[in-house]
Structure formats: C-alpha cells, structure tokens
Image (spheres, helix red, strand yellow):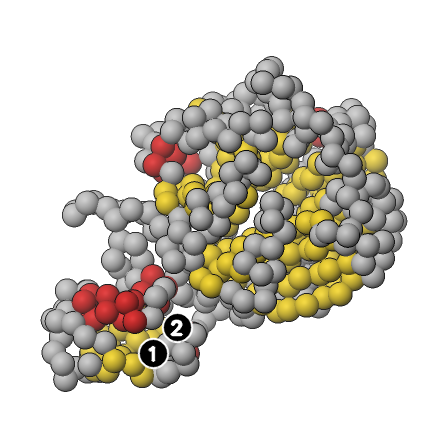
Amino acid sequence: MKVRIPAPLRSYTRERHEVEAAGSTLGAVLGDLERRYPGIRFRMIDEQDAIRRHIRIFVNGEQVRSLQVPLGAADEVLVVQALSGG
Amino acid sequence: MNPSLAAPKPAAGPVLLVVATRKGAFLLRSDPARRGWRLSGPLFLGHTVHHGLLDPRDRRTLLLAARTGHLGPTVFRSLDMGRTWQEAVRPPAFPKAAEGRKGRVVDHVFWLTPGLTAEPGVWYAGTSPQGLFRSDDAGATWSPVPGFNDHPMLEKWTGGEQDGTPEGPKLHSILVDPRDPAHLYVGMSSGGVFESRDRGASWAPLNAGCLADFLPDPHPEYGHDPHCVRLHPLAPDILYQQNHCGIYRMTRSEGRWARIGASMPKRVGDIGFPMVLHPRDPDQAWVFPMDGGTVWPRTSPGGRPAVYGTRNAGKTWQRLAAGLPKGQAWLTVKRQAMSADRHEPVGIYFGTTNGEIWASRNQGARWTCIARHLPHVYAVEAVGLRP
C-alpha cells in the first residue's frame, strides 16, 4: 500500500514523498517500512509502541491511534509531523 | 590501584571544538597556535543536538546526540571526522514494558561519554528522563544498563519524571575511572551523584556533605541537583562538581563533598552550570557563575560575565574577565558548554545561549570571541588534533 512520508522523514526514503509498504496492520506496515528504510520507525513510534506526540497517522483520511488497526492493500497511510516551536 | 597517573606531555596541535546547538552542530578548528579559528557547518541543520564529541581515542569518530522537532531521539555517527554520517542502528531506548505496565520513553539523549582507551568502541549515553545506556560498537547499537535503569530505588532517587530541569530530568556527567573501567559515576538532575564499582550492576548515592536547600531535609542521602560533575583524569580520586547549591570538591577516600564555592565573592555567589578541570593539575578548575538568586535568572551576575578560576583546589578564586563584555551582557553557559584543551597554557572555551563561542589560550587570562550568531549553544567539547 501507499505510505505518504512527511518532509522531516524523507531523509530515510531518499527524499521520496510516497513509498510502498506491506502488512495487515498498521504495526506490520510500519515494521515493513523499517525494513525498507532502517531507522524511520523509531522516529515516529516510541519504544513502548506509542505514536509519538505531535506525530499523526491517518488511514484513508481518518486519524488512527493504535498500531493494531487492520489495513488492506488498497488503504493509504499518511504520516504527518506537526511543526511547532521556535 | 594507583592514586594518580603519569601526566602526559601537553598537546601542541590544532584544537577542534565540537559545538552542539539547538539547531544543529558546528565544528571550529584552530591553527596550532590557537590564534585563528575556522568555522564549518552546520551539520544536521534544524536538529536539536544536545551533545557532540570527537572520540579522543581515534580522533576520527564523531558522535552527535540529536532529536529533530517532534521526531524521536537518535545518535548520529561519523567514522571519518564528519565527512559521512550514519544513524545509530539501535539508538538508546528503554525496554518495552510488559503488557499493562507503563514503560519509560527516552525523550532525548543528553550526554555522551567515550570509554577508556583500553576499551575501544565503548561509549556511554545519559538520557532525559534519566537513563544510562552503553554501546560497545562506537555508537552503532545502544543497550540499557539495567543495573541503573531498573534499580528499585531509581524513582525515589530521582523524584520521578516531573522533577528536573525545564527540558526534563537528565542523566549527565558519566565519568569512567581511568584506572578501572568498572568504576563509574553519574550525575542526575535531579537525583544527585551516584557511583558504581561493578560496571553499572549496582549503584550507591555519593552526596554526603552536599546541600539540597530546596528539600525539607537540606542534607538528604539523595535528591540533590548536580549540574556538572568532573573527575580529574590524572588524579581520579579527586572529584569536583558545580551543583545547584554551590561548588564542591571531594577526595574519594574521604567520601564527603566540601563546599569550595564558599570562598567565591559573595556578590557573585557559587551557582552555575559548567565546570572544567586543568588536564594536568588537579588543584586548578574553572567555573562560569550565574545568577541563582530570587527566581534564578541563570544569567551572568549583574550582566557582567566572568569565568572564575582556582589554582589551589578552591581555597581562593580569581575573576577572569579580560576581553569579555564589561556590562549589559546577560549570558548563560550550559553545563556541557565549557571545555578545556590539553595545551600549555591550557585553552578554555565556552559557548553561550545567545550563540557566541569564547576562547582563551592562556587559562582565562584573556578572552576572544571566535564565533557569534550561532544558535543557542548546548555543548562545546575541545579535542586536540594531531600536529
């Protein structure tokens, strides 16, 4: 499925805005993303498997908060990182 | 165990300053006379870099402790003096908690310490919230030190995650006894100074004699707020610390901190963040006092910045301000932002939160601003390069 990557994480995807990853849950998709682009997962997901503060993940336009969310091959994942602070 | 180690010859080559800032890292390289400086960077522009070090064992490996906006923390590493970079394969992270239990999360890596020459590739990292991590492969993979991170007393020692600095409680000042790699010290803000003699498997507080005037009992066993702790590399039984409650020195066999800041001028006080030691003389040290009165402005007292140095283990202090602004200069120098080289006379360097780097190549007798308009400086670390 397609995963859209925010600008601060594109150093991991060789500047690609959109990449492919596979899996039947959001956690599995992020695991596949990590295999393809090592290091990217820990910058979005902490060591307790929580989505980091100010990171938002949307599936088909709906925000999700759990890595257990089931996904299908036609779903589209969008990762957003808030830009705040000075 | 030898009480002291043989003094090496003073360094003679160029000096490299690794400057870590809130918006990236910079390198400042001197000529051999330390008169001219060349600034390069930024490295990782826009990333918050809390600490950066060139490995003194190989003078090639550079490690930067970074986080990026709201992205998770990591360590960037270069094995070729900054020409190319890789990210740690496994950055410092606490273990995943058992189902139903709340696990801890590293907010940022705050402190890096290389191991001894006899242990190439070994590094330690301190994090916020307080955690201790070790790498055996030059920073590629990091493992928790469970004897510290899972210590049953840790929450009592630290007061929990709400206590500590405005940017979060920190583990800092990781010190390795140069005679014995199993003998470690750490400082925690808050928590105090702690010591391990078995490579981190067990720990004990080391705070006797140190004041904690913000607690109901001002002389507790733990709960103190060391800002910066130093161990003398040639006389490793001599420890110094700049604490929230003054400047202290300890001879380890006595096991008790003595407040050597009591001899600082009263109008200046003995509050500050950083402290650096003379590389060869354990009686010489320098601090950068700040205003710790009323609401703790943490700026130079009276807007008149000065380094204070002692040549007699804190019995007396000398104001060292020649070349620094004479007034209306409200500088803050953070705990990792002051460093010394190994030349003779010793060079001292500090970076300010308003982005200036100041250097003295004569032990503070005269200061020169060698860089300005940098971002908020978190750390300045000096390493001698080969002549």
Q: Residue at x 29, y 81 (%)?
A: A19
Residue B1 image offset from top left, x and y in percent: 58, 18
Number of other residues with Cα within 10 Å of mark 2, as a class: few under 14, some 14 to 19, many 20 or more: some
What mark, if any, has residue A48 been given in the picture? none
Which numbered disc, 2 or 1, marks the residue closer to the eye? 2
Q: Is residue B241 visible?
A: no
Quadrant in the rendering for residue B261:
top right
Residue occupied by mark 1 = A5
Q: Secondary structure at mark 1?
A: loop
Which is nearer the eye, B197 or B23? B197
Identity of the amino acid at label 2?
Tyr
Which is nearer the eye, A19 or B245? A19
- Residue sticking out furthest to the top: B254
Identity of the amino acid at label 1?
Ile
Residue B241 image offset from top left, x and y in percent: 62, 33
Q: Residue at x 43, y 26 (%)?
A: B198
Q: Would you place residue B248 above or below residue B326 in this image?
A: above
Residue occupied by mark 2 = A12
Quadrant in the rendering for residue B352:
bottom right
**A30 left or right, relative to B89:** left
Mark 2–mark 1 distance (CA, rounded to whole Å): 10 Å
Upstream in sequence: badge 2 or badge 1: 1
The number of numbered badges drawn on the structure is 2
Residue B343 image offset from top left, x and y in percent: 79, 43
Q: Secondary structure at mark 2?
A: loop
Q: Residue at x 69, y 55 (%)?
A: B17
Q: Is residue A57 visible?
A: yes
